[in-house]
């Protein structure tokens, strides 16, 4: 009876009475194949845009390596075909080729390993419809990066907040603040342990121009708002507790304003009379459900 071969590895299975005088040579090849299967790291040199990763019966071949280190100088994305297509395969892959590598075995799914990344891939040996799947993804992490977590007391729920995050390194670095509670250029604003924020420079407020005769007084449009009256007007209150607006009103035609319910804290407790030239400036703010107002003054 002639020798046969293990279905996924190419190891020669010597039949009884076979290989007289060469049994030792065959066994040595088999042992070297086993060495590749268990701990072998193979340098795979890519060129062009295609490569065949072959497992040969009874002979050493690149498809027997456990770890594949992709190198060479491919001219673009390189498609690596795992051959034959009826063998189950499990590979650790590190792509250092400078291009993406697409692993395929049949018409089923493929796996793309981008340059500079690691992957653990599985080929199901399904013949013409064989598929390649990514079992897991291992991103290169330095010791310094791992030490960032040293002493962290995050709960599972808190760590799971990161599940699905698509932020880039640059975007995540916006949170890299030297001292909590102080502002830095191009960094996230944070509060210190007391909830305080110290601004190193001025605060730029949005300036918004109201229009019409029934505008909503809403600070989300801007905390400084200008309003040139076009007729007798009735603004509406859209402030929430703790919000305020500085309002500059231009009333050159002596129109009137019917205000929402406001507690005026100066001007004898009554709504201010608007100047007919320049601006009348008032501040309105809300505490709980009470809307307050104060006359700042007129400017010609």
Image: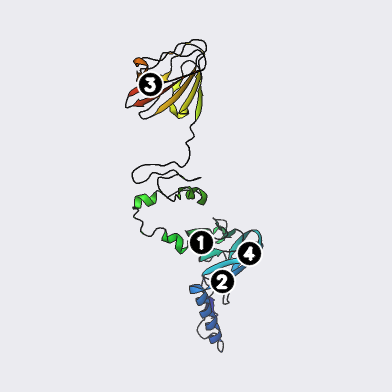
Check residue 293 in the rendering and tell me which mark sits there, or answer none.
3
Residue 185 rendering spot, x and y as whole percentages:
50, 45
Q: Earlier in the sequence, mark 4 or mark 1?
A: 4
Circle 1 or circle 3, nearest the eye: 3
Q: CA distance from mark 3 to mark 4?
A: 76 Å
Q: Residues within 10 Å of mark 4 (few under 14, many from 20)?
A: some
Q: Residues within 10 Å of mark 1 (few under 14, many from 20)?
A: many
Residue 80 rendering spot, x and y as whole percentages:
60, 62
Q: Earlier in the sequence, mark 2 or mark 4?
A: 2
- Marks 4 and 3: in contact by CB < 8 Å? no
Closest to the observer, 175 or 8 = 175
- Is 286 left, or right, of 225 in this rendering? left
Q: Is residue 263 positioned above or below 190 on the image?
A: above
Disc 3 is placed on an element classified as strand
Residue designated by label 1:
119
Residue designated by label 2:
42
Circle 4 or circle 1, nearest the eye: 1
- Is 259 left, or right, of 77 in this rendering? left
Q: Residues within 10 Å of mark 3 (few under 14, many from 20)?
A: many
Residue designated by label 4:
51
Residue 219 rendering spot, x and y as whole percentages:
44, 27
Q: CA distance from mark 2 to mark 1?
A: 15 Å
Q: CA distance from mark 2 to mark 3?
A: 78 Å
């Amino acid at each position: 009876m002639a020798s046969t071969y293990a279905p996924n590895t190419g190891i020669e299975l010597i039949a009884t009475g076979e290989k007289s005088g060469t049994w030792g040579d065959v066994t040595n090849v088999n042992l070297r194949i086993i060495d590749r299967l268990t701990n072998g790291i193979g340098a795979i040199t890519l060129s062009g845009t295609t490569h065949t990763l072959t497992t040969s019966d009874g002979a050493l071949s690149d498809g027997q390596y456990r770890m594949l280190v992709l190198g060479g100088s491919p001219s673009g994305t390189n498609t690596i075909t795992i051959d034959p297509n009826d063998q189950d395969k499990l590979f650790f892959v590190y792509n250092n080729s400078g291009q993406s590598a697409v692993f395929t075995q049949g018409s089923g799914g493929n796996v793309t390993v981008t340059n500079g990344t690691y992957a653990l891939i599985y080929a199901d040996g399904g013949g013409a419809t064989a598929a390649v799947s990514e079992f897991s993804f291992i991103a290169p992490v330095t010791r310094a990066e791992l030490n960032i977590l040293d002493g962290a007391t995050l709960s599972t729920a808190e760590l799971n907040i990161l599940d699905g995050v698509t932020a880039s390194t640059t975007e995540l670095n916006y949170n890299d603040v030297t001292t909590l509670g102080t502002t830095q250029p191009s960094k996230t604003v944070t509060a210190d342990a007391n909830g305080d924020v110290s601004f190193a420079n001025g605060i730029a407020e949005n300036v918004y121009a109201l229009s019409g005769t029934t505008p909503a007084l809403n600070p989300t449009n801007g905390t400084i708002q200008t309003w040139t009256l076009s007729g007798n007007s009735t603004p509406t209150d859209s402030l929430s507790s703790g919000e305020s607006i500085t309002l500059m009103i231009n009333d050159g035609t002596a129109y009137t304003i019917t205000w929402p319910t406001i507690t005026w804290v100066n001007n004898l407790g009554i709504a201010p009379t608007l100047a007919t030239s320049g601006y009348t400036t008032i501040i309105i703010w809300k505490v709980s459900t009470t809307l307050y107002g104060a006359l700042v003054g007129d400017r010609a």
